[in-house]
Image: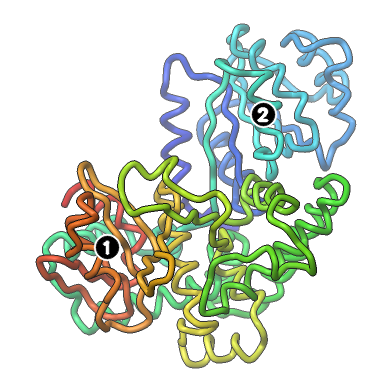
């Protein structure tokens, strides 16, 4: 089975090249490809690899019975599996660490010992992060891995950096794509929207060259997420978290996409459910888009914690959660505007998060003024409007022209149309969203 190239590959190589590297923790949601990427890197770069999975091999949860020191851990690992070799320079991989977060305490000792490289990974490490941080602060490096973005999907389809660099050049030059290029990218992006970025789903599609079985795989992942909630959430929160998770597609399909706790269950109150939102976000299952109090810099600290939108971290899973009739409209007609534009916003929000942005939106009280997202360059706050069609972006124009919002100099519109630029608004197709951060750095 061919390995799908990922962006974390370059990070892992850089980590190994660092002279003073620390034990590495790879965080991320279930099935985003953490283990595959780590093991591909391991076997390409190390002569000897020790791999331990705390879910599949629960016996290894006993390796700390004699203490947290490196010698104690290595001795107990070799006792359980005498075939392990621990020559200096060995890479030790501790996988599914959410099942045994106490392992974090050993990272300090592995760093001080210095004989071995260590990589830990797990699908719900965000839930244990405070515990892990307190036990290993100063002795670890963290990286978060997400499902494949559109660029990684293009790599899987055989397109290389030159193809992506050409897309960026079109954006920088303001040069529309040719009709042929535009049709090709729209078709590729539709496939990506339907499939999402879960590597197993994408790999099945690439190997078969059909969508056969991909929907079943996605729906199984949704069930697996629900099983994780039942397994790892504590007490009454299980039911509340499940209610929130299942409500996301329903609420995104409304005209007002702000997530309303009152719609989750009868008598539901924000204070009773806020922890559920944090749980889903920490688990890497959802992206939270905060409501700005006013559209100005700085963004952090300038939002109302009680108002937000929730998006699936992987749009393919949102698609898989939709009704069969909506699925058919999307798959047969390429209608990304299903569910009142929910897919458009989810796709763009996902692309921004995977580029390293936090999500913010703005809705002026008692007004039609509303903006979907905000990003920034070195000096400006940049509103980003997501449009179903390439028509007038009224709110975007209002924000740019208003003398009240001095941090806003220009805006970006994302739509199904081609590239276009005016003095105030730069228009790009949806499929360029993953390049926005690079574009703004080089603009």
Q: Is residue 128 left or right of residue 366?
A: right
Residue 384 place in picture, x, y as percent: 32, 63
**In which quadrant of the rendered image does the N terminus lie?**
bottom right
Decide which of tag 2 and tag 1 comes sooner along the chain.
Answer: 2
Number of numbered markers: 2
- Front residue of this view, candidates 81 and 361: 361
- Residue 368 vs residue 249, the one in the foreground: 368
- Where is residue 90 drawn, in percent x and y? 62, 21
- Dot 2, how many residues are within 10 Å of its Cα: few (below 14), some (14-19), or many (20+)? few
Query: Crowding near pointer 1: few (<14 within 10 Å), some, many (20+)?
Result: some
Vertical order, 82 against 3 (above or below): above
Q: Are marks 2 and 1 in contact (CB under 8 Å)?
A: no
Q: Which mark is residue 72?
A: none
Q: Which residue is mark 2?
A: 130
Relative to 192, say whether 304 is above or below.
above
Who's the residue at 62% across and 49% down the image? 281
Coloured how? rainbow
Query: Could you say which quadrant of the image residue 165 lies in?
Result: bottom left
Q: Position of residue 184 (x, y in %)?
A: 32, 79
Is 439 positioned to the left or the right of 42 in the image? left
Q: Quick one: SS at disc 1? A: helix
> In the rendered image of this protein, does residue 173 appear above or below residue 177?
above
Q: Residue at x 38, y 68 (%)?
A: 370
Disc 2 from disc 1: Cα separation:
41 Å
Find residue 163 and name its label.
1
């Amino acid at each position: 089975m061919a390995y799908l190239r990922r962006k974390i590959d370059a990070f892992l190589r850089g980590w190994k090249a660092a002279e003073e590297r620390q034990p590495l923790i790879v965080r991320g949601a279930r099935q985003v490809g953490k283990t595959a990427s780590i093991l591909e890197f391991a076997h390409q770069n190390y002569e000897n690899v020790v791999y331990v999975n705390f879910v599949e091999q629960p016996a290894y949860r006993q390796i700390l019975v004699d203490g947290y020191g490196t010698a104690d851990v290595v001795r107990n690992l070799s006792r359980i599996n005498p075939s392990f070799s621990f020559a200096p320079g060995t890479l030790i991989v501790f996988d599914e660490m959410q099942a045994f977060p106490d392992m974090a305490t050993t990272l300090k000792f592995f760093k001080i010992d210095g004989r071995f490289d260590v990589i830990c990974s797990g699908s719900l490490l965000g839930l244990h992060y405070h515990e892990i941080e307190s036990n290993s602060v100063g002795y670890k490096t963290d990286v978060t891995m997400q499902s494949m973005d559109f660029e990684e999907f293009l790599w899987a389809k055989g397109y290389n950096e030159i193809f992506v660099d050409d897309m960026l050049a079109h954006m920088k030059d303001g040069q529309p794509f040719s009709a042929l290029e535009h049709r090709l990218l729209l078709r590729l992006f539709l496939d990506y929207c339907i499939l999402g970025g879960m590597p197993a789903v994408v790999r099945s599609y690439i190997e078969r060259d059909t969508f056969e079985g991909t929907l079943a795989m996605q729906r199984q992942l949704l069930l697996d997420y629900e099983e994780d909630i039942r397994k790892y959430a504590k007490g009454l929160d299980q039911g509340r978290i499940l209610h929130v998770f299942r409500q996301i597609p329903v609420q995104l399909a409304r005209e007002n996409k702000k997530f309303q706790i009152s719609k989750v269950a009868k008598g539901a109150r924000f204070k009773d459910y806020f922890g559920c939102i944090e749980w889903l976000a920490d688990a890497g299952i959802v992206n939270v888009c905060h409501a700005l109090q006013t559209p100005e810099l700085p963004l952090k600290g300038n939002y109302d914690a009680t108002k937000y939108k929730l998006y699936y971290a992987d749009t393919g899973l949102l698609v898989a959660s939709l009704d069969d009739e909506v699925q058919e409209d999307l798959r047969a007609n390429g209608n990304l505007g299903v569910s009142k534009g929910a897919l458009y916003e989810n796709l763009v929000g996902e692309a921004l998060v995977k580029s390293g942005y936090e999500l913010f939106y703005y809705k002026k009280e008692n007004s039609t003024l509303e903006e979907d997202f905000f990003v920034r360059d070195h000096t400006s706050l940049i509103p980003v409007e997501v449009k179903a069609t390439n028509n007038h972006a009224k709110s975007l124009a209002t924000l740019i022209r208003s003398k009240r919002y001095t941090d806003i100099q220009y805006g970006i519109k994302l739509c199904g149309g081609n590239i276009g630029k005016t003095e105030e608004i730069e228009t790009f197709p949806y499929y360029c969203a993953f390049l926005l951060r690079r574009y703004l750095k080089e603009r």
